[in-house]
Amino acid sequence: PIHFARQFKRSTGKAPHQYLIEMRVSRARHLLAGDLPIAEIAYRCGFSHQEHLTRLFGRQQGTTPAAYRRALRL
């Protein structure tokens, strides 16, 4: 596992977990354009609950999922 993690980071510039979180948040951004509840989006993207999505989405995007969705609809 450590060898894989080193090689992965060398190839992508990111740790495997960081890459996975970025992919999940990216998928959540796409799903937020639709009408699914945020809790359902969190579940579909592999987050343990809505608050987990909100916390990591905020770190990466600088806003909450709800605010991001509102901005898309303007």
Image (cartoon, rainbow, N blue to C red):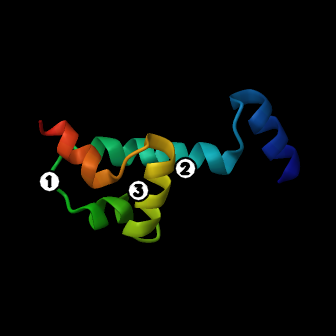
Q: Quadrant of the C terminus?
A: top left
| Mark 3 neighbour class, 10 Å CA radius: few under 14, some 14 to 19, many 20 or more | some
Tell me the residue that label 1 is attached to.
35
Q: Residue at x 44, y 51 (%)?
A: 57
| Mark 2 neighbour class, 10 Å CA radius: few under 14, some 14 to 19, many 20 or more | some
Q: Residue at x 88, y 45 (%)?
A: 3
Residue 43 lies, in percent from the top left, at 37, 65
Location of residue 61 with respect to 58 vertically, above or below = above
- Tags 3 and 1 touching, CB below 8 Å: no
Residue 5 lies, in percent from the top left, at 79, 45
Mark toward the start of the polypeptide (2 vs 3): 2
Three-letter code for the amino acid on which mark 3 is drawn: Cys
Q: Residue at x 18, y 46 (%)?
A: 70
The CA distance from mark 2 to mark 3 is 9 Å
Q: Nearer the viewer, residue 1 or 60?
A: 60
Number of numbered discs present? 3
Query: Position of 50 compared to 10: left or right?
Result: left
The CA distance from mark 3 to mark 1 is 15 Å
Inspect this view and state whether residue 46 appears: no
Residue 45 image label: 3
Q: Nearer the viewer, residue 36 or 63?
A: 63
Three-letter code for the amino acid on which mark 1 is drawn: Asp
Mark toward the start of the polypeptide (2 vs 1): 2
Check disc 2 and report its element: helix, strand or loop.
Answer: helix
Three-letter code for the amino acid on which mark 2 is drawn: Ile
Residue 43 image label: none
